[in-house]
């Protein structure tokens, strides 16, 4: 009889603690739901998330204003849900979102920049700009050096044709002087012909 009473009390205490735990969990969930409902959220689709994870910071002009709450691949784009934690803050229409480095550890953040004329014309609250990857920068540098090399080659060819530069002996100053003298002779010849034409015209 005593054992049955003890067993009954244990079960009653277990049920009571289970109910207390249940109400605590429900209370926490309801509280978090109300807090989350008050927060401002934004949803965007980006073609290149480049290192963003759930919890990555969201910055507006360098100031932290929120974080990434959800990331999901949808078709050929990445869906991002942004939660704004700064009180009474909303993005102006036409802001530009892009992914950038955040700190020395290589972590990434979603950077938001003020709107431009082009982003305002898009009609979106948040316009998306693809992040600049290292491969893009390398390709741009390669193109730039290629153009510089092409310009240098053309200048060298022109200098050799004119006789200004002798790559064995350096710059040929005598060649420059001869070319300038030739140009002076041609100019003087044109001026003299023009003067003769004006003189004949006045004699008539």
Image (spheres, helix red, strand yellow):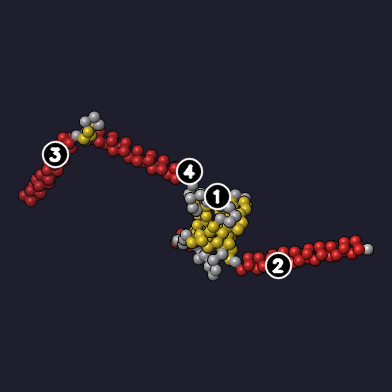
Q: Quadrant of residue 16?
A: bottom right
CA separation in Å, label 3 and label 4: 52 Å
Label 2: which residue? 27
Instruction: First in sequence, mark 3 or 2: give its number.
Output: 2
Q: Nearer the viewer, mark 3 or mark 1?
A: 1
Q: Residue furthest left?
A: 203
Q: Which residue is mark 3?
A: 181
User: Residue at label 4?
Assistant: 135
Contact check, label 4 and label 2, Cβ < 8 Å: no
Q: CA distance from mark 2 to mark 1?
A: 35 Å
Measured in 3D between alpha carbons, the distance from the residue under mark 4 to the one under mark 2, in whole angstroms, is 50 Å
Residue name at image x 22 percent, y 33 percent:
170
- Residue 166: x %, y % from top left: 23, 32
Q: Which is nearer the eye, 54 or 148? A: 54
- Element under disc 2: helix
Residue at the spot of label 1: 51
Q: Is residue 58 left or right of residue 177?
A: right
Question: Foreground mark, 1 or 4?
Answer: 1
């Amino acid at each position: 009889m005593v054992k049955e009473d003890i067993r009954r009390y244990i079960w009653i205490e277990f049920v009571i603690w289970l109910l207390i735990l249940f109400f605590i969990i429900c209370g926490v969930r309801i509280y978090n739901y109300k807090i989350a409902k008050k927060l401002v959220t934004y949803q965007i689709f980006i073609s290149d998330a480049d290192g963003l994870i759930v919890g990555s910071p969201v910055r507006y002009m360098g100031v932290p204003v929120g974080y990434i709450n959800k990331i999901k691949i949808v078709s050929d784009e990445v869906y991002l849900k942004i939660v704004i934690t700064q009180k009474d803050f909303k993005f102006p229409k036409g802001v530009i979102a892009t992914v950038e480095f955040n700190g020395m550890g290589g972590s990434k953040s979603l950077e938001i920049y003020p709107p431009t004329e082009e982003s305002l014309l898009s009609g979106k609250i948040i316009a998306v700009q693809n992040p600049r990857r290292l491969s893009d920068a390398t390709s741009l540098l390669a193109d730039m050096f290629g153009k510089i090399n092409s310009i240098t080659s053309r200048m060298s060819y022109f200098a050799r044709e004119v006789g200004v530069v002798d790559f064995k002996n350096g710059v040929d100053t005598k060649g420059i002087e001869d070319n300038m003298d030739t140009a002076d002779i041609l100019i003087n010849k044109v001026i003299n012909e023009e003067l003769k034409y004006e003189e004949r015209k006045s004699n008539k």
